[in-house]
């Protein structure tokens, strides 16, 4: 069942609930056949955006188009979108077969064809022959597969998934991630996938849209989002990093007690900045070459804990900054109070402007709706 | 031990009618003497009693049906999603349960008399009002179990709002509707206060005839009919409870 794919465009979309803003100024183009993740913490606006794309919520302002056709005010049942929810949302009074047949019935597909298509959809999610079972006799993972079969059986050209694996345990989640990805590759359908799990977004997506406080922080491939975060929020939320506060005066980066940092200057106006290193740009014991320009910083271990294969240590830098590093090498003393040598690669430093009003301010608590409106019963 | 005593205290007055209804004595006495089913026979031959039985049954059935028609949409609206002002509306629609029946009865008598509604339809209307809260509450608890995103899911799969109600919400609310109707039936079946006001000599329900009989002459037919009321009520409540048990276990 190869499927055509739909492109989706959002133009300056906003959603307000009374005085609070859930989503603001969202401009977005999702290409046909793309696998796009919307990533962000609770209340960042990703679920609200998804609901507007699916038609469950109407934007307060702005326009949504599918393949160039305005669907902003089209009812969800007329959008022909497959939707998968976090809590499966199977109809408990219907059998698995009846659940999967539901969208076909709604489309008045003749009964004979219906059975065949239901059977094929269940095979697709590796649950062949489950037609007669009731949803409550299935495990969480099986129920979500049924939900996926139900969302795909009518061959929609767009599939949206709202934290579909959020209720599953870690091992099953990883298996299902690969299966969903494989389904996407096989069917070619456009997928919009909402998650708060950065690892999930990095593994699965062609592109990631990072949301924070109702706005898009960055859109990019997983590699772009990870290696070239556009904002400090993205750097913090996607992957680990170690950050130092510094001042950029237009010529040099000056970091408190460390003095001038030998790091390529950023294309930024003068002002306070954060200089970040991803874990792969941080050396711990390996002495760099003599001509290395790596920064040598001595950090003090505050606390540390074994995390299976690595030790995670919370450290304090001479600049007063704190951060977490993963220690994989043997022979490093990571007990609290110990000093460890960090070699930070100059050419891998990421320089970002300090987020304005980073702590407090902005849209603060007002946009917590996102995940609470989803349902009081979890 | 104490529990047994309390149970006995609660049940004794109700159970006492059972032996009294099979007494051979001409008047209602306890302990009964002998054994006779003639009072039950009376019940099914004396037109006064048969008419009252038929009246009560019709009123109770219609009451349950109307209560379901009114209470189901209200229960779904109040139970399925949260909205502003929901608490106030809920308090208002269940208020008939809290207001003393005598107050309702007097108010209805005065109002219904104006519109010449005293009699069969007046009593059905009054009983419907009294029992609608039962249906609302049972339907609410039924739909509260439904995942709110089930409706969104159905919409996304191609169902219009009307189809969502018909194919998803109503079937899932059905156990609540049935329990509510059973409660409604039982309540109407043995309601006497409002019925005393809204019936007339040409139309009396069973509890009203019993009330009259107890005041005029005291023969064990009253005990026989009380036994039947008791048994019917217990059976219906048992059905309702068993249904509820099965449902909770199912989940």
Image (spheres, coloured by chain):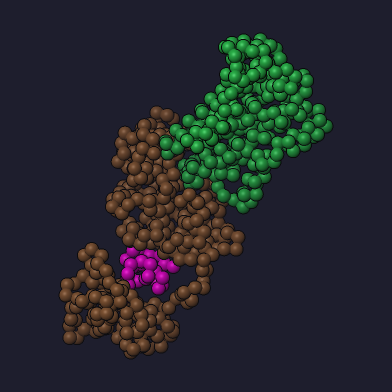
Chain colours: A brown, B green
Number of marks in picture: 0
Is B70 situated above or below B153? above
Residue farthest toward the right in the current orientation of the protein: B114
Is A264 situated above or below A45? below
Between residue A12 and residue B240, name the one nearer to us. B240
Asked whether residue A219 is drawn in magenta, I would say yes
Asked whether residue A243 is drawn in magenta, I would say no
Q: Quadrant of residue B198?
A: top right
Name the residue at 78% across, 23% down. B200
Between residue A140 and residue A193, name the one nearer to us. A140
Residue B185 location (% of width, % of height): 61, 28
Residue A375 location (% of width, % of height): 49, 51
Residue A287 location (% of width, % of height): 18, 81
- Relative horizontal placement of residue A365, taking residue B39 as reference (left or right): left
Name the residue at 35% across, 84% down. A319
Name the residue at 52% across, 59% down. A369
Between residue A137 and residue A261, name the one nearer to us. A137
| Region rendered in magenta | A217-242
Q: Quadrant of residue A194?
A: bottom left
- Relative horizontal placement of residue A27, taking residue B12 as reference (left or right): left
Is B34 situated above or below A182? above
- From where the camera sits, is residue B248 visible? yes
Name the residue at 60% across, 19% down. B31
Q: In which quarter of the image is the C terminus of chain B?
A: top left
- From where the camera sits, is residue A145 visible? no
Residue A261 location (% of width, % of height): 32, 86
């Amino acid at each position: 069942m190869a499927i055509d794919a739909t492109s989706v465009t959002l133009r300056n979309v906003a959603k307000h609930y009374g005085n609070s803003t859930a989503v603001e100024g969202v401009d977005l183009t999702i290409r046909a056949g793309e696998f796009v993740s919307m990533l962000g913490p609770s209340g960042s606006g990703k679920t609200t955006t998804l609901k507007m794309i699916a038609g469950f919520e109407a934007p307060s302002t702005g326009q949504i188009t599918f393949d160039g056709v305005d669907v902003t005010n089209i009812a969800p049942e007329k959008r022909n979108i497959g939707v998968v929810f976090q809590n499966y949302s199977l109809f408990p009074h219907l059998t698995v077969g009846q659940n999967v047949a539901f969208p076909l019935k709604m489309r008045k597909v003749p009964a004979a064809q219906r059975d065949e298509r239901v059977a094929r959809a269940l095979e697709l999610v590796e649950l062949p022959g489950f037609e007669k079972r009731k949803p409550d006799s299935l495990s969480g993972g099986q129920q979500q597969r049924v939900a996926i079969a139900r969302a795909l059986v009518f061959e929609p050209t767009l599939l949206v998934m709202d934290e579909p694996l959020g209720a599953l345990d870690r091992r099953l989640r990883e298996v299902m991630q690969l299966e969903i990805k494989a389904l996407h590759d096989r069917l070619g359908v456009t997928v919009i996938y909402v998650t708060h799990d950065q690892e999930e977004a990095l593994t699965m997506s062609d592109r990631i849209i990072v949301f924070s406080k109702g706005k898009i922080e960055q859109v990019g491939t997983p590699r772009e989002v990870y290696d070239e975060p556009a904002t400090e929020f993205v750097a913090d939320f996607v992957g680990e990093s170690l950050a130092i506060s510094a001042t950029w005066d237009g010529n040099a980066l000056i970091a408190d007690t460390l003095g001038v940092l030998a790091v390529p200057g950023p294309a930024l106006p003068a002002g306070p900045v954060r200089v970040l290193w991803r874990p792969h740009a941080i050396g711990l014991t390996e002495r760099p070459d003599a001509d290395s320009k790596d920064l040598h910083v001595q950090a003090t271990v505050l606390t540390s804990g074994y995390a299976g294969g690595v030790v995670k240590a919370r450290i304090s830098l001479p600049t007063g900054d704190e951060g977490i590093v993963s220690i994989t090498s043997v022979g490093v003393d990571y007990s609290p109070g110990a000093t460890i040598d960090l070699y930070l690669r100059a050419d891998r430093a990421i320089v970002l402007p300090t987020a304005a009003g980073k702590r407090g301010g902005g849209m603060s608590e007002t946009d917590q709706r996102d995940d609470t409106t989803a349902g009081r019963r979890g | 031990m104490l529990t047994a005593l309390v149970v006995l205290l609660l049940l004794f007055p109700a159970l006492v009618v059972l032996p009294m209804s099979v007494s051979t004595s001409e008047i209602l006495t306890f302990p009964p003497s002998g054994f006779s089913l003639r009072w039950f026979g009376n019940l099914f031959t004396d037109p006064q009693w048969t008419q009252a039985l038929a009246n009560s049954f019709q009123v109770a059935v219609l009451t349950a049906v109307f209560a379901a028609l009114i209470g189901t949409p209200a229960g779904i609206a109040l139970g399925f999603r949260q909205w502003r002002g929901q608490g106030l509306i809920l308090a208002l629609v269940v208020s008939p349960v809290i207001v003393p029946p005598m107050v309702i009865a007097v108010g209805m008598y005065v109002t219904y008399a104006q519109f010449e509604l005293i009699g069969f339809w007046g009593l059905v209307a009054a009983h419907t009002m009294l029992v609608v809260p039962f249906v609302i509450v049972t339907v609410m608890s039924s739909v509260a179990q439904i995942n709110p995103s089930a409706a969104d899911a159905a919409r996304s799969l191609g169902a219009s709002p009307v189809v969502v109600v018909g194919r998803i919400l109503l079937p899932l609310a059905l156990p609540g509707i049935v329990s509510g109707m059973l409660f409604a039936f039982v309540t109407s079946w043995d309601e006497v206060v409002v019925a005393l006001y809204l019936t007339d000599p040409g139309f009396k329900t069973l509890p009203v005839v019993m009330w009259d009989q107890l005041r005029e002459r005291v023969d064990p037919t009253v005990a026989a009919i009380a036994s039947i009321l008791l048994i019917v009520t217990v059976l219906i409540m048992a059905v309702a409870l068993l249904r509820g048990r099965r449902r909770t276990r199912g989940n």
